[in-house]
Image (tube, rainbow, N blue to C red):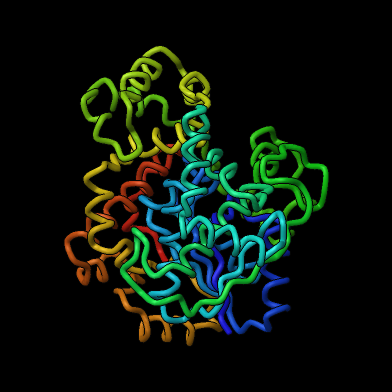
Amino acid sequence: MNIGIVSEYNPFHNGHKYHIDESRKTLSAEAVVAVMSGSFVQRGEPAVFDKWTRAKAALLNGVDLVIELPAVYSCASAEYFASTAVGIMERSGIVDCISFGSESGDLDGLAETARIMNDETDEFKAALRKRLDAGDSYPLARAKAFDVCLTGPNDILAVEYLRVLNREKHENYEKHEKSRIKPFTVKRWGSGYHDTEMNSGFPSATAVRKALAEGLDIDKAVPENVLELYRTSPRNCFDNYVGMLKYIVAAEPGRLAEIFDVSEGLENRIADCVNKYQTISEIVAVIKSKRYTYTKIQRILTQILLNITIADMEMFRNDGGAKYIRVLGFRKEKEGLVSELTRKSAVPVIMNLKKDERNLNGTAKRMLAKDTLAADIFNIGIGRYRSEYESELIIL
């Protein structure tokens, strides 16, 4: 059995290793395949380390193959993020089971929640509308609209994975019968997702990022074999892009209304705040409201940086979502797994960017261009001016 894990590893820490080890042991897995966000993550900000550093950390600690989740989906809502990642696993032809962490650890309860959301009963729709009319953000309104309690962000993503596995079609993947991929969950231990304190051996990624930013010791929070990697890799943060964001807004203010998640005149509020404030943190804090969460605003700002438009996302959806699988790295003893991927994949596999992009259709090339742009913009943030085409596959 091969396990698939949707991941960001931002950065890789002890909780991630626990999840991999528990999944492998419980399921007697032969291989672990991670579908990982690249340069920008689902919180709507640049990853703390580049995708190659994070892929290497994963490969050092139990992952056998790392595949990149395309940038247009890695910085999108939970539904887009989850459905595309699962779609990539399905198209790969090599993943038998998806394993995900959850605060509840209750697979049956999560599956029932997924069923309610997929069926969209009249009661669910009415409850959702009531919460939206009360001013709740969509994620919060949705969470309040059904009876099964979701206790944290991992539960929310878990439900999205289960929704994809159990419905006959979804927006980012072509019609299909119920997925052959089976779900498995590992109960999350240690600090909560948003906890910022390094108060356990399993702190949150948020806490590890905060400690890194403050120069604090992270030795007990991450596997020993990644410490030197983290010490020698440049770190990124969203505030590195405030100048770039200001330039884009000043040069092309009319473009904001075309950005994917911008609606209800929000482009005017964004333009005003970008002009007035000097850090991304300030801009987001001022724009944030009950309806527009901090994370939602961050995602919109990232979409502005990457010029991810409504037209782009409609084009990608109409073409069936991710139409390629890009490998970032693998363990050398698992070369057979890579061979199996290239043989079974329903879409082109990219191992060599320059050579393999020739096998893509026009829409897929446009999606890949967003990946390379995201990587190039990420590199500007850390002061490394290297083209994505110069990056090499990680093989350990």
Task: Confirm whether residue 255 shows in the render.
Answer: yes
Which residue does the image show at 69% across and 44% down from the upper left?
A: 208
Which residue does the image show at 31% across and 47% down from the upper left?
A: 373
Q: Position of residue 389 (x, y in %)?
A: 31, 58
The image quarter containing residue 356 is: bottom left
Q: From the viewer's side, name the closer residue of 70 and 294.
A: 294
Task: Confirm whether residue 396 shows in the render.
Answer: no
Q: Farthest residue in the left direction?
A: 362
Which residue does the image show at 33% across and 70% down from the upper left?
A: 350
The image quarter containing residue 323 is: bottom left
Q: Position of residue 76 (x, y in %)?
A: 42, 47
Q: Position of residue 93 (x, y in %)?
A: 42, 81
Rendered view: 96 above or below 324: below
Left or right: 97, with 352 as reference point: right
Rendered view: 92 above or below 322: below
Left or right: 188, with 259 as reference point: right
Q: Farthest residue in the front direction?
A: 122
Which residue does the image show at 64% across and 41% down from the upper left?
A: 209
